[in-house]
Image (cartoon, rainbow, N blue to C red):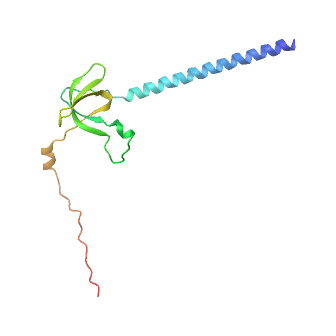
Amino acid sequence: MKYDDAGKERKLKLCELEELREEAYECASKYKDDMKRAHDAKLKPKEFEVGQKVWLYNSRLKYFPGKLKSKWMGPYVITRIGRLGDVTIKDPKDGSKQTVNGHLLKPFLEGNNEKKDENVELVNFVVSVPTYEVE
């Protein structure tokens, strides 16, 4: 009789343990879904047009780190945009073309050089240093 009671009690504890495991799995799954929703809400879709200038991310810097090296190469000109996120870019310097993932690109913002020259103020940071005569 004691063995039957111990077996039932053991079976009950195993069922409770299984319920706790399933509850923890559901909570973790809900947390992951909430975090994905929050992350996706912050993402801004990148929209490019043919003829637009873009920067290309230099992924080789991960393997050969350079503290002062720029992570972006370019500017390149977009020649074709594919349906699956692939973008063909052309280097205006030598005319070479390559197809890359659209996630590796960011828009190149050109400044207006005419307005920049008008508003430039020259500031002199050189301060005259007094000289002393030693006798």
List the single residue furthest toward the bottom: 135
Picture quarter containing residue 111? top left
**Residue 78 located left or right of residue 58:** left
- The residue at the point 36 percent across, 40 percent down is 61
Where residue 119 appears, as percent x and y from the top left, is 15, 50
In x, y percent, where is residue 77? 20, 31
In the rendered structure, the answer to whether residue 35 lies left or right of residue 1 reads left
Task: Count how many numbered circles sit on residues in the image.
Answer: 0
Residue lying at 81% horizontally and 16% vertically, measured from the top left: 6
Side of 40 relative to 25 (left or right): left
Residue 21, by quadrant, is top right
In-image side of 21 versus 101 (left or right) = right
Residue visible at 68% across and 20% down? 17
Return the residue found at the far right. Answer: 1
Residue at 17% from the left image edge and 32% from the top image edge: 95
Q: Is residue 11 above or below residue 121?
A: above
Foreground pick, 83 / 44: 83
- x and y, in percent, of residue 25 in the image: 58, 21
Residue 38 lies in quadrant? top left
Residue 50, image x, y percentages: 19, 26
Q: Quadrant of the N terminus?
A: top right
Please tell me whether residue 18 is drawn above or below residue 121 in the rendered image: above
For the C terminus, the image quarter is: bottom left
